[in-house]
C-alpha cells in the first residue's frame, strides 16, 4: 500500500505562510481525490481541502481564500500552501486519499505539526 509522509510544518506568527508537502511512496496517478486533513488538540480530525485528478479543488469554509491545495502526479506529491495563518489553524496536518466525507483510503502518516502564534 502507498505510504504517506508529510513535511513542511513549523512555528509561524499569525499572518504568516507555510507550504506543506505530502510525498507518496507509490503512484498517486490513479487516485481520484487526495485531501489534506488536520487535527487540533482535543478535537476530531477534519477535512481541510481536496484536489481531484483533474485539478479541481474544494475547501473547508474556514480556510477558503487562504489555503491552496495542489498535486503533482509526476512527483507523487500533494501540497498545501497556507497563507494568512491564524492561531486556530494550529494542528497536526495529514494527507490521505479522500473517498467520502467520512472515509479515507490509505493508512495515515505521522503528519506535520503547524503552530501559529498570536
Image: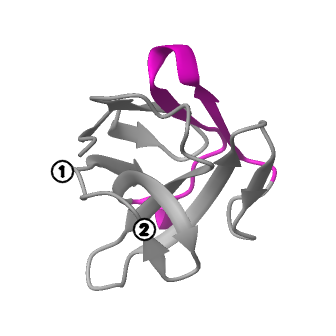
Q: Residue at x 65, y 39 (%)?
A: 83
Q: Is residue 110 left or right of residue 65?
A: left
Q: Position of residue 65 (x, y in %)?
A: 81, 50
Q: Residue at x 42, y 28 (%)?
A: 27
- How packed is label 2: few (under 14 Cα within 10 Å), some, or many (20 or more)? some
Q: Position of residue 68 (x, y in %)?
A: 70, 40
Whether residue 46 is visible to the viewer of this picture, yes or no, is yes
Magenta stretch: includes residue 87: yes
Query: Which residue is labeled 1 in the image?
Result: 110
Q: Which region shows up in magenta? A: 65-90
Q: Is residue 106 above or below residue 72?
A: below
In the displayed image of the protein, which residue is found farthest to the left?
110
Q: Is residue 59 above or below residue 43?
A: above
In the drawing, what numbered circle is on residue 104?
2
Q: Is residue 65 above or below residue 80?
A: below
Q: Is residue 107 left or right of residue 58?
A: left
Looking at the picture, tell me which residue is in the foreground, 111 or 42: 111
Tag 1's secondary structure?
loop
Q: Position of residue 84 (x, y in %)?
A: 66, 44
Magenta stretch: includes residue 94: no
Looking at the picture, tell me which residue is in the foreground, 84 or 25: 25
Q: Is residue 24 left or right of residue 88?
A: left
Which badge, 2 or 1, comes first in the chain's sequence?
Answer: 2
Tag 2's secondary structure?
strand
Amino acid at each position: 500500500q502507498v505510504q504517506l509522509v508529510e513535511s513542511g510544518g513549523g512555528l509561524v506568527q499569525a499572518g504568516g505562510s507555510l507550504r506543506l508537502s505530502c510525498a507518496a511512496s507509490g503512484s498517486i496517478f490513479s487516485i481520484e481525490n487526495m485531501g489534506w486533513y488536520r487535527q487540533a488538540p482535543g478535537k476530531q480530525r477534519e477535512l481541510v481541502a481536496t484536489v481531484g485528478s483533474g485539478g479541481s479543488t474544494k475547501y473547508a469554509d474556514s480556510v477558503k481564500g487562504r489555503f491552496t491545495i495542489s498535486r503533482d502526479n509526476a512527483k507523487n506529491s500533494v501540497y498545501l500552501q497556507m497563507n494568512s495563518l491564524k492561531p486556530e489553524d494550529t494542528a497536526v496536518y495529514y494527507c490521505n486519499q479522500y473517498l467520502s466525507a467520512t472515509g479515507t483510503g490509505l493508512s495515515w502518516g505521522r503528519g506535520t505539526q503547524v503552530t501559529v502564534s498570536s
